[in-house]
Amino acid sequence: MRKSLAALLLVAACTSGTHPIATQSPTPTTGGPKLPVAHPTLWLCQPKATGDPCHTPLDTTVIQAGGAKVTQPAPDVDQKVDCFYVYPTVSRARTTSAPLQVDQAERDVAVAQVAPFSSVCRVYAPVYRQLTVSALFAGKYNDRRARAQSHADVVSAFHDYLNNNPGRRFVLIGHSQGSLELLSLLQEEVDGNAALRQRLVSALLIGGTLKVPAGKAAGGDLQNIPLCTSGTQNGCAVAYNTFDTTPPPTTLFGRPDKARHLVAACTSPALLAGDVDALKPIVPVSQALTATTATTTFVTYPGYLTGACHQRGGYAWFQVDVHRVAGDTRPAELPKVLGPAWGLHLYDVSLALGNLVELVRLESR
């Protein structure tokens, strides 16, 4: 269990070692008061940075029902908005808090989860002293000092981004621990700030804990930022947790908050992107759902998956279903690496990544 959990949270990061990357932010383009920055931001990704994993080639092998493989290059489009990405729990450091450095795990998860967004937005991704996989195993995930340090890094980096990109519209993207950080950031920095809400395209809080009143798009954890209900809406949030069956009572995700009379938020990225329930997975070749000889960065599976939001017994989740035809070589079910309680957490982003990219494309117009 320990080994498989580490593999899941690390998103197939198999090696370690630091990589040189730009540490200084660009010179501010305008004057005026600046937001406080705790320390120079170490950017995992930022526009025009050397060795930026968020600008990995987006070549993709299409795996059809019969096993045919075709390479599709990604389109080159003008990025009208920015994406600020906070990655999930990936650090393999043995300490409670990750060091402020770029390791292979951070690079791998950036390729897997946010590189495809580079076709529709300029990607900024700060390194932060997150709670590590070791901290999770040791039961230290709620260490107050470590969590405060982690959050301070994210806030500082967001301030740094705002200081150097006045007026630019932005999308917030996070998964798991990254979504928790961004939810806190929204509550503290954006939800009560009308000027920043005007610049917010959307917040993609995937695999997190956003709560809303049952049957309502606004209220609960965010008072002024509603759930997205269309692909042309701005200033809204997308949130979901993926399962392929009803979550068990032991699950960590999609649980109601009975004390506050709230339920977990669920918004369908496929529906918002205009794809009804058809999912457009974009999966790193190292995590391909089937054995493949593809040499491209990503693989995708057209006509294979559908997804829709479900609610039952107070729980809310995004259910992903497999659809195969005669002779289909793709698997009949998706891998639940951590067991039923975690659902498809590893693939929260990947299974609908094409839909999410299209959604940002629509919103940015």
Image: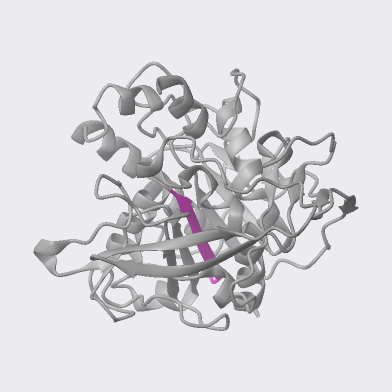
Q: Residue at x 35, y 75 (%)?
A: 225
Q: Is residue 282 above or below residue 3?
A: below
From the viewer's perspective, is 182 left or right of 187?
Answer: right
**Image spot of residue 187 (x, y percent):** 28, 63
**Image spot of residue 62 (x, y percent):** 82, 53
Region in magenta: 167-175
Question: Extreme front residue here?
Answer: 326
Q: In the image shown, does 248 or 362 lie closer to the viewer?
A: 248
The majority secondary structure of the magenta stretch comes to strand
**Image spot of residue 337 (x, y percent):** 49, 35
- Please identify the quarter of the rendering in which residue 190 is found: bottom left
Q: In the image shown, does 213 or 157 lie closer to the viewer?
A: 213
Quadrant the N terminus occupies: top left
Q: Is residue 161 above or below residue 187?
A: above
Residue 256 appears in the picture as rendered:
yes
Q: In the image shown, does 153 or 291 lie closer to the viewer?
A: 291
**Image spot of residue 217 (x, y percent):** 34, 79
Q: Is residue 197 magenta?
A: no
Question: Extreme left residue here?
Answer: 259
Q: Residue at x 23, y 65 (%)?
A: 314
Q: Residue at x 51, y 42 (%)?
A: 346
